[in-house]
Each structure stands twice: as structure tokens, then as C-alpha cells.
Image (tube, rainbow, N blue to C red):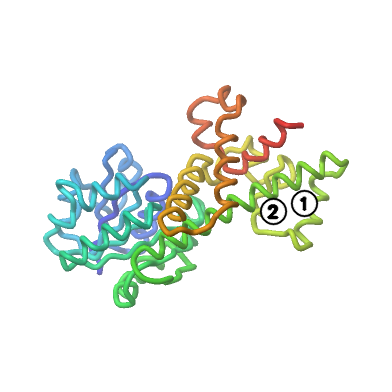
């Protein structure tokens, strides 16, 4: 598959599309916000004026869209590509959406004789630019084998976790756990500081003991402990607090629909909701609020000193 259409050129989609172009794929780009295509001026890529124009000659279509509604509209809407695509391209959805919507799209694709893989990612814009994303794939063995050459320029950790919808389930589980671990790390650091501990020394103890984690080591929520962490940059950058709230909502919805018991997930969602309503947020401009990292949960504990 050489003719690739990439749809959704936001913070994640743009660097992913750049990777495909740089690796020699024949890429057509589309975004409902045409200004997002300007960063590709001078690149060896075509810019489509509409979704139908984007997909008509594609061997594969990759989407990176913001939510369930956008994915459902693109694939299943009045002009959804499942019904209008002439070549029946292989579909790869890298969006983070609900398992329910993913499986609904997969059923519609199967009914039209189209192969599809859900392929949500982990790693953030930096990893996307470096080609070091993690992909969690849901789909048939044959379809996954077909799409691997397209994903390898964008990610170096690619795991086939099951049938359609399982990729989304894996992403939701991972992000729920990340939210829980970040909240626990912030709480432990706040408790330690309350009792006279230096947060940097406590972080060192945690990381060399049973409480250690990737987040404590690489994404420490206490400002000043780790120079390149979002917490040391006014909590800007990293993984957006608003996206974590979205992913926690997806996790709890998934849990409810499958009767799964997720008390820590529910508690974490409540804590992050509290963080998003802190008075300090009201003093920030809209752009800075949108860029707040989920480690901002540390400030919830500061508010109770």
C-alpha cells in the first residue's frame, strides 16, 4: 500500500503524517480546518479539499480525530467514507474513542467488505515526531499484517492486542492507570512535604523503592524536581488535563457497559474534575488552560496545605 490518506492534522496527526511523507509514501492530507494543512506546504504531499476527494484513490486511510462524534461522522455519516470510498481502502483509526463506537464502525466496514484496524497511540507529540509512538492494535491477524509497514515509520512499539475494539480498550486501561498513578504520586509527595521531607529526595526514595513508576521518574508532578517535566514549566505541555478527563470518562463508560468494577478509576475521575475547577485555573488564558498537563493534579494538594 503506497497511496495513503491521512485525516486529522492536529498535535498528533501532523507529526505522524510528516513521518509517512519522509519515508516515501504517497500521502494525501485532509483536515476540516484547512489551515492545519499549511505546515505541509513544500512537502511532497497532496492537499484534499474534501473527505471524498481525500479517500477516492487511497489504498489506506489513517484517521486521527478528536472524539467519537468526529469518527462516527467521518466513517458513518451522510457522506461517510465507508459508503463512498471507491477502492475500499484499508482503514486505520488512531483516534482515542469509545470501544462501542469503534466496534460500530468496524461492523459497518465489514458489511461493506472493508478491512479496519483500531490503532490508538501512546507517547505524545514528541514521540510522534521521532517515530517512537506505542500502537495498540485491534483487528484481524491479516489486516494487522497489512498495516504494519504503514505504522512502523510512526511507532517502534506496536502490539496486536485482539479483535476490533481491543486496541481502544487497551488504550483506555493504560490511561486510566496513568491517571491513578499520577494522583497517587502527587498525594504521596504532598504528604511527605507536609512532614518535612524534601520533594526531590522523597522522589529519589520512591523511584528506588516499591512505589517507583515511569511517571514518578519521567513525569514528576512536583515543580522543580525534574527540570524537563511539565510541572517545572508551569504545568504546560505533556498530556493535556482535558484529554485525561476525556479518557477517564471513556474508561468509566466502558466499565459501566461491561459491569467492570473500577472504584479507583471513579475516584480518579472525581479528583481530576476537582482539579479542573480550581480557582487558579480561572486566572489562566484559554490557551494555557488547554495546554495544562494532567500532572496539574499536584496543585489540588497544594490547595489544601
Q: Residue at x 56, y 51 (%)?
A: 265
Does the CB distance between marks 2 and 1 fall below 8 Å? yes
Residue 250 image point, x, y percent:
44, 50
273 relative to 168, above or below: above
- When asked about the image quadrant of residue 58, the answer is bottom left
Q: Residue at x 41, y 63 (%)?
A: 167
Report the residue that reaches farthest toward the front: 259
Where disc 2 sits, the SS reads helix
> How packed is label 1: few (under 14 Cα within 10 Å), some, or many (20 or more)?
many
According to the picture, the residue beneath numbered tag 2 turns out to be 216
Q: In this view, does 243 lie to the left or right of 194?
A: left
Residue 142 image point, x, y percent:
30, 77
- Find the distance from the CA under tag 2 to the CA under tag 1: 7 Å
Looking at the rendered structure, the number of numbered marks drawn on it comes to 2
Residue 98 image point, x, y percent:
38, 53
Report the residue that reaches farthest toward the top: 283
- When asked about the image quadrant of residue 262, the answer is bottom right
Q: Which of 302 and 124 is in front in this view?
A: 302
Residue 36 image point, x, y percent:
33, 40
Q: Which of 173 and 197 is in front in this view?
A: 173
Q: For the C terminus, which image quadrant?
A: top right
Where disc 1 sits, the SS reads helix
- When asked about the image quadrant of residue 204, the answer is bottom right
Q: In this view, does 130 lie to the left or right of 43?
A: right
> How packed is label 2: few (under 14 Cα within 10 Å), some, or many (20 or more)?
many
**Nearer-N-terminus badge (2/1):** 1
According to the picture, the residue beneath numbered tag 1 turns out to be 203
Amino acid at each position: 500500500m503506497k497511496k495513503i490518506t491521512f485525516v486529522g492534522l492536529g498535535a498528533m496527526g501532523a507529526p505522524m503524517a510528516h513521518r509517512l511523507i519522509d519515508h516515501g509514501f504517497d500521502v494525501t492530507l485532509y483536515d476540516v480546518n484547512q489551515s492545519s494543512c499549511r505546515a505541509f506546504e513544500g512537502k511532497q504531499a497532496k492537499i484534499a479539499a474534501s473527505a471524498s476527494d481525500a479517500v477516492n484513490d487511497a489504498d489506506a486511510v489513517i484517521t486521527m480525530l478528536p472524539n467519537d462524534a468526529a469518527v462516527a461522522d467521518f466513517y458513518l455519516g451522510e457522506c461517510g467514507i465507508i459508503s463512498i470510498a471507491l477502492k475500499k481502502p484499508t482503514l486505520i483509526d488512531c483516534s482515542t474513542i469509545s470501544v462501542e463506537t469503534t466496534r460500530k464502525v468496524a461492523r459497518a466496514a465489514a458489511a461493506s467488505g472493508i478491512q479496519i484496524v483500531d490503532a490508538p497511540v501512546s507517547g505524545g507529540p514528541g514521540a510522534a515526531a521521532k517515530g517512537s509512538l506505542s500502537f495498540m492494535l485491534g483487528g484481524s491477524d491479516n489486516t494487522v499484517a497489512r498495516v504494519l509497514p504503514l505504522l512502523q515509520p510512526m511507532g517502534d512499539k506496536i502490539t496486536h492486542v485482539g479483535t476490533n475494539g481491543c486496541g481502544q480498550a487497551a488504550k483506555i486501561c493504560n490511561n486510566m492507570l496513568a491517571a491513578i498513578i499520577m494522583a497517587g504520586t502527587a498525594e504521596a509527595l504532598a504528604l511527605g512535604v507536609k512532614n518535612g521531607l524534601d520533594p526531590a529526595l522523597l522522589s529519589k526514595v520512591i523511584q528506588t523503592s516499591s512505589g517507583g513508576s515511569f511517571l514518578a521518574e519521567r513525569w514528576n508532578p512536583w515543580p522543580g524536581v525534574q527540570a524537563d517535566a511539565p510541572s517545572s514549566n508551569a504545568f504546560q505541555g505533556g498530556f493535556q488535563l482535558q484529554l485525561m478527563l476525556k479518557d477517564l470518562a471513556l474508561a468509566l463508560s466502558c466499565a459501566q457497559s461491561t459491569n467492570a468494577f473500577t472504584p479507583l478509576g471513579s475516584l480518579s475521575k472525581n479528583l481530576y474534575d476537582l482539579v479542573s475547577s480550581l480557582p487558579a485555573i480561572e486566572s489562566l488564558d484559554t490557551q494555557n488552560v488547554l495546554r495544562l498537563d494532567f500532572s496539574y493534579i499536584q496543585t489540588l494538594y497544594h490547595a489544601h496545605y
